[in-house]
Image (cartoon, coloured by chain):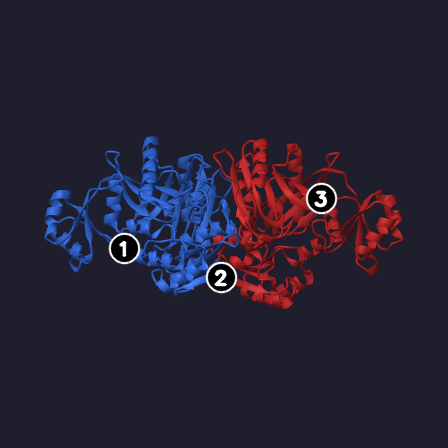
Chain colours: A red, B blue
């Protein structure tokens, strides 16, 4: 297989979506002299609006809008999962502009049932699950999976939305109905896994190679990731297994691009693949400064057909903290005091002009060689930062 | 003195100029959620054009154009020296928008005679020089400074343009005329210093503090910087002296912003300040990946009133290589093979769509812990890269 390191003149990368993930990938595209365009919402305040003059206004699932992007770009990539694989496939075919990750890959991920079947068939452990065809199956499902169990809509879930934990038949029935099960939407039931930690691994992959990022721990509060600890504070062998499962998962979906895989670590130290994302991921933000090559560089490389580069950690430890809006109003930026310490602190604001409680406004990463000190500094920096 | 770490909501930074230096500073401004605008040329192909929708088209010395930028921005900064201090001062006064570095600082630097007098008065060694008022003084000047000596126009020189090395009276007369000396332009004569190396130090400074970057060696070919070696391969004491002279120089001009200072290291290990630049500098590009805080972050911090942060080196050694156009035509990007080595390689392309021989199209930085290996890898990477 021959290896290509070359981009043609005036290369253009199109993003379906104008959020912070596209924005951070765009920063890397710019570093390679690549021009960037994006589909942005009618609000006019998407993070991408401020960093490129090339905006295609409309919905990320709208064929006509995507065709405009496709006619402008050399390659198109994604930054979220709220897309329609059929529309993606049609845009790719009609425009001749490649979409990476491919619509075929996306089709495997956009539906939770197909996703879990695909990974299970590839020998990657997932939590036991089954499709619930009707309300009548709910009690039997409880017998099979044990109470409580999870109900999830096969399509459209995100950060825990579209998921219901149900502890008895009445809750199950209500959940099934709320998820659209009685209106013909596919609902799956999943064993409620007791996990000790949630781990995540980023993988960049295309026909030129596959690389993985260090296994990290993600810490969620109210279904939102608040912190990421790198490397995950677990045995080396668990991290190695996790990284190798993530690589296998990227292969199972024939992934071309950047992928995030989230795992449960059970009380028995078993790893179960929980979710996958076909795009840069919050659990990889640490790599901007902690690694020799960031997830965003490898995202751009992978979708533009350049060889992905195996990242190495520059420091023993990294902690990433999401900076969530604390109240509603104009966003400001109050930086922490970087001080004269051994740790590095890096603050990122996403250019969102309006804050809302819980909104991801930015993140900060602290790097150093002592994991305890790094965590302490990160928490201090978080409380000193306002955004 | 109280320390402010805070930016107001929707902060806007305006750049006078749309070249690669503004572009790289803009990348850092974006990381802080700052909005960026720039005065760009009529060509429509300045590096900034692709990374911000906010462009003010016109000349960087045109009052009306600068006023438009000033009315849009919270703060204005520079990216080159081809400006007019009087226009800057008038724009600052009429708009109320601060300009950093200030017009007063700029006034001291834009004129080589005043610059050298300022530094000499502050106790910073500079090469012996004198003003040449007329052709009649040229032979006497040769007696005083020795032949050959340098003739320089006080204003408008850059990368060696506007400088003439003269070895005899006929050359001196021709040079004096070519520099406009006979038409009333101020010309200075400077001793032709025999130096063993050229060193450089970046300084970021505002009312909240002063920080310096590690002293590096710059290597020029045909008056263009081709490589930068960090740290400069000279005794630690020379590097320390150089850094402390640079800090003193930034203070001497009351600098608020980012400044580059270039020094000659003479055969007697004496340091002479040669040139200063009131902006990010080619000799500081290594800092993007080699340091905990890049020159571009400190540029943005210093001009936006945030405290500059003292950078530390992440690696023992860094080599930056300028990627110069090799022929005329469409720019492409051929990356080197990053390989599986201990060194990091980082390639930056400036988004210039057309190459010309000798045009600065981008740069690459190699980082590692063994200076010899780093240099070897850098030269290899340079020959593998096309742009």
Q: Residue at x 49, y 37 (%)?
A: B342
What's the CA distance linking mark 2 and mark 1?
31 Å
Identify the subunit bearing mark 1: B
- The quarter of the displayed image where residue A243 is located: top right
Q: From the viewer's perspective, is B222 left or right of B284?
A: left
Position above or below: A291 against A60 = above
Q: Is residue B349 visible?
A: no
Q: Secondary structure at mark 1?
A: loop
Q: Residue furthest front?
A: B1
Quadrant in which the C terminus of chain B appears: bottom left
Q: Secondary structure at mark 3?
A: strand
Instruction: Measuring from the top left, give residue B122's x and y in whole percent.
Output: 27, 40
Identify the subunit bearing mark 2: B
Q: Earlier in the sequence, mark 2 or mark 1?
A: 2
What's the CA distance linking mark 2 and mark 3?
41 Å
Q: Secondary structure at mark 2?
A: loop
Front in this rendered view, residue B56 or A40: B56
Residues at marks 3 and 1 touching, judged by CB atoms closer than 8 Å:
no
Residue located beneath label 3 in the image = A273
Position above or below: B146 against A350 = above
Position above or below: A266 against B51 = above
Residue located beneath label 2 in the image = B53
The mark closer to the camera, 3 or 1, is 1
Identify the subunit bearing mark 3: A
Residue located beneath label 1 in the image = B156
Instruction: Say if labels 3 and 1 share a chain.
Output: no
Instruction: Say if labels 2 and 3 share a chain.
Output: no
- The quarter of the displayed image where residue A365 is located: top right
């Amino acid at each position: 297989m021959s290896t290509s390191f070359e981009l043609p003149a005036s290369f253009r990368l199109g993003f379906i979506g104008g959020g912070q993930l596209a924005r951070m990938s765009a920063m890397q595209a710019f570093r390679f002299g690549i021009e960037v365009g994006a589909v942005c919402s009618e609000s006019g305040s998407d993070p991408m609006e401020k960093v490129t003059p090339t905006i295609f206004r409309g919905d990320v699932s709208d064929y006509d809008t995507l065709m405009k992007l496709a006619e402008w770009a050399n390659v198109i990539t994604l930054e979220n999962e709220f897309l329609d694989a059929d529309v993606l496939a049609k845009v790719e075919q009609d425009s001749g502009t490649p979409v990476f990750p491919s619509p075929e890959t996306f089709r495997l991920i956009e539906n939770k049932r197909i996703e879990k079947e695909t990974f299970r068939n590839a020998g990657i452990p997932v939590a036991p699950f089954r499709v619930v065809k009707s309300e009548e199956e709910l009690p039997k499902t409880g017998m099979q999976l044990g109470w409580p169990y999870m109900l999830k809509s096969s399509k459209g879930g995100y950060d825990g939305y579209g998921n219901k934990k149900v502890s008895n038949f009445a809750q199950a029935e209500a959940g099934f109905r709320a998820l659209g099960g009685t209106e013909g939407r596919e609902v799956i039931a999943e064993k409620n896994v007791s996990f000790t930690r949630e781990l995540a691994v980023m993988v960049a992959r295309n026909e030129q190679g596959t690389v993985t990022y260090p296994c990290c721990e993600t810490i969620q509060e109210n279904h939102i990731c608040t912190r990421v600890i790198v490397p995950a504070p677990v045995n080396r062998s668990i991290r190695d297994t996790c990284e190798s499962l993530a690589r296998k998962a990227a292969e199972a979906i024939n992934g071309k691009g950047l992928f995030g895989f989230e795992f449960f670590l059970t009380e028995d130290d078993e790893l179960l693949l929980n979710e996958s994302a076909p795009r840069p991921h919050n659990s990889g933000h640490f790599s901007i400064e902690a690694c020799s090559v960031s997830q965003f560089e490898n995202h751009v490389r992978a979708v533009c057909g350049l060889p992905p580069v195996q990242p190495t950690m520059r420091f023993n430890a990294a902690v990433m903290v999401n900076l969530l809006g604390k109240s509603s109003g104009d966003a400001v930026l109050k930086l922490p005091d970087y001080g004269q310490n051994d740790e590095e602190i890096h603050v990122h604001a996403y250019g969102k002009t309006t804050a809302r409680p819980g909104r991801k406004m930015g993140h900060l990463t602290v790097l150093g060689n002592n994991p305890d000190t790094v965590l302490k500094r990160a928490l201090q920096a978080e409380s000193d930062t306002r955004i």
